[in-house]
Image (spheres, rainbow, N blue to C red):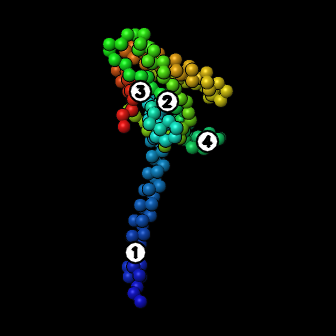
Amino acid sequence: HEPTQQQRNPPTPSSLSCRLEEEKKTETTTTTTTTTTMAIIKSGKVVIVLSGRFAGKKGVVVKTFDDGTADKRFSHCLVAGIARGPRKVTRSMSKAKVEKRSKCMKPFLKYMNVRHVFPTRYTVDMDLKKTVADEDLAENKVEIKKNLKKIFEERYLNQKEVTSEKKAAGSAYFFQKLRF
């Protein structure tokens, strides 16, 4: 009958305190991760959806809910994105053909957990808060999607008229197909 590991080397008070400190560190890192994530995810930020029906699609954060709501008790955000992007356009195509190829764009609008979106470094200056109001979302989702489609198409066709370089790079990235 051999003694077990604990019987051979009983824990010392210093080793117990080290374990407690490690546990405290892991607890604090999980809480700071969610707060830093919410600090990064703000309205206008381009995100990539990680899970669900629209996984791998790009979207723009419309509104964030840091502490959650009564029905969703977790931090989440309202994301408006492109379910089906514009078709490929070349320089030799006419304006009419470019417009026709951009008509096939299909938007989506969804509440998502912050852990299910990946924030990118890009931001877009599309003002979607006016188009998408929380009160109207339940009843008029079809009309809101139509308005989103108009906004996305207009921005896609007029990308060169964006005010700052940073916003221009964000809108160019938003409309590019994700390569993976």
- Give SS at disc 1: loop
**Viewer-side residue, 83 vs 136:** 83
State how far apart marks 4 and 1 are (Cα).
45 Å
- N-term mark: 2 or 3: 2
Residue 117: tell me if it is visible. Answer: no
Question: Label 4 neighbourhood size at 10 Å, few (<14), some (14-19), many (20+)?
Answer: few
- Identified by mark 2, the residue type is Ala
- Tags 4 and 1 in contact by the CB under 8 Å rule? no
Task: Kindly identify which residue carries mark 1.
Answer: 12
Please state the horizontal and vertical placement of residue 101, each as a whole percent of the image: 44, 18
Amino acid tagged 3: Phe
- What is the residue that sits farthest to the right in this orientation? 139
N-term mark: 4 or 1: 1
Residue 171 % position (x, y): 40, 23
Residues under numbered marks 3 and 4 in contact, where contact means CB atoms less than 8 Å apart: no
Residue pointed to by mark 3: 174
Mark 3: secondary structure? helix
Q: CA distance from mark 3 to mark 1?
A: 56 Å
Seen in the picture, residue 101 relative to 23 is either above or below; the reply is above
Residue count near mark 1 (Cα–Cα under 10 Å), binned few <14, some 14–19, many ≥20: few
Give the residue pinned by disc 4: 72
Mark 2 to mark 1 CA distance (whole Å)? 58 Å
Camera-near label (2 vs 3) is: 2
Q: Position of residue 137 (x, y in %)?
A: 63, 28
Mark 2 residue element: strand
* Residue ID for mark 2: 83
Q: What amino acid type is highlighted by mark number 4?
A: Lys
Work out which residue is located at the far left of the displayed protein and give it. 91
**Closer to the N terminus: mark 3 or mark 4?**
4
